[in-house]
Amino acid sequence: MNGPFPETDPLDREIAVLLAHDARTSFRQIASAVGVTEGTVRTRVRRLQAAGLLRLEPIIDIASCDDDSAQAPARHMAFITVRCHAGQMDQVRAALLAMAEVQALYDANAAHRLVAICLVDSVADVATLTNAVFALDGIRDAESEIVLQTIKYNATIGPIATMEGLAPESG
Amino acid sequence: MPPESRAPDARPTRRNRSGALDAIDRQIIAALREDGRAQSTAIGEALGLSGNLVANRIRAMDAAGTMRVVAVADFRIHGYRMLARIRFQVHGRSPLDVAHDLAARPDVLAVHLTSGRYPVSCLYAFASARDMVKAAHDVSAGIAGVEDVDVELLNTVYRYRPAIGPIARHGPEAP
C-alpha cells in the first residue's frame, strides 16, 4: 500500500467528511461550512476524484438486492482467504478477479495470501463459490467465513486509491 | 426539508415496505453510478422521467436506507497510512460483546461476526506501524475475552467495489 499518491491537506479531509453521508450536497453549502469559495470546493473535489482518492457514488443496501434484479443478487457477505503455492499467486489472483462475486481482493502480509470479499445470494452459494476457489490451479488451501452479523460498517472510507496503477482492472 | 415542501408523490412507496428496488430505482442508480452528482432533471431527461420523480425516488431510497449516494474517500485522506484485517478468537465471553468493544474504537472501520475460526473480524486503520503494534497490544490486553489475534496487513488492493454493503443499519457513518 505504498504506491505514490498525491498529497492531501485538512481542507480535502473536511470536504470529504461533509460529502460523506450525502455526496449530492451542494458545493455552496459545503463552501460556507468550511469557509472557502464554491469554486475552491469544486476544484478540490475534481482534483481528488482525478487522483482516485474520492468517489461519489451510490451504494445499495445489501438487503435491498432482490432476486429479480438484472445485476447479481447479493444478500450475504463472505470472506474467502486463500493461500497459494509459491509462484502461482498471479494466476490465482487473475482467476479470483474473474469471479463476479468477488467485490474486493487484496493480498495480505505479502505472503502468498489473498483475501476476497464476496457477495452471494445464499449460504449454499458460499459453499459453491468456496468449492470453485478450491478448484483453481495454484491454491494450497482456502478458508471461507460467512458474515453472520455486521456490528459496524463505514462505506465512506476505504482503500480506493490503491487499485490505480497497481493492477489493471476490467469492469 | 420543511413539511409544506413535501410533494404528494414524495411519500414512501411500495419499495419502502419491501426494502426492494424497482426497475425505475435501478435505472436511476445506474445513472448515479455514471455521475453521483448528476442533476435529477438531467437523469430524468435521459430516462424519460420527470425531474421531480427522480428527486423523490432518490430521497425515498436515501430515507429508507436502500441506497445512498456517498463520498467514498481513500483512507489516506483521513491521515491513515495502513489498513489491517484483525480477527479474534474469543473465550469466556460472547463474541458480540467483544465486537461492540471493538466497534467503539474510532480507528475500527468495520466489525463483523463471522462463521469462521475467528468469530470476530474487523477492519482497522492505522496512521503508522507503531500505532498498529500498539493497537494489537491494546486489543489483546484491553478487551476481555480476546484469546487469539490474527493481524493481516493489507498489502496490495486489487479490487475494491463498495457498491453494495450493509448500509441500512450501519451507516454510512461519519469517519
Image (cartoon, grey):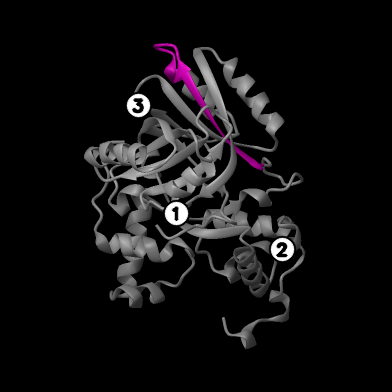
Label 3 resides on the chain identified as: A
Label 2 resides on the chain identified as: B
Q: Specify the farthest residue to the front.
A: B92
Q: Residue at x 30, y 37 (%)?
A: B137
Picture disc at residue B16: 2
Q: Are marks 3 and 1 on the same chain?
A: yes
Q: Secondary structure at mark 3?
A: loop
- Amino acid at circle 2: Asn
Picture disc at residue B63: none
In the image, taking residue A19 as reference, residue B169 lies left or right, namely right
Q: Secondary structure at mark 2?
A: helix
- Amino acid at circle 3: Asn
Q: Are marks 1 and 2 on the same chain?
A: no
Q: Residue at x 67, y 62 (%)?
A: B47
In the image, taking residue A60 as reference, residue A94 lies left or right, namely left
Q: Secondary structure at mark 1?
A: loop
Q: Residue at x 69, y 68 (%)?
A: B49
Label 1 resides on the chain identified as: A
Quadrant in which the N terminus of chain A is drawn: top left
Alpha-carbon span between mark 3 and mark 2 = 43 Å
| Disc 3 versus disc 1: nearer the observer | 3
Alpha-carbon span between mark 3 and mark 1 = 24 Å
In the image, taking residue A88 as reference, residue A4 lies left or right, namely left
Q: Is residue A51 above or below residue A83?
A: below
Q: Is residue A94 above or below residue B45?
A: above
Which region shows up in magenta?
A: A74-90
Q: Nearer the viewer, residue A150 or B160?
A: A150
- Amino acid at circle 1: Thr
Q: Residue at x 66, y 50 (%)?
A: A63
Please name the residue that numbered disc 3 is placed on: A109
Please name the residue that numbered disc 1 is placed on: A156
Q: Residues within 10 Å of mark 3 (few under 14, many from 20)?
A: some
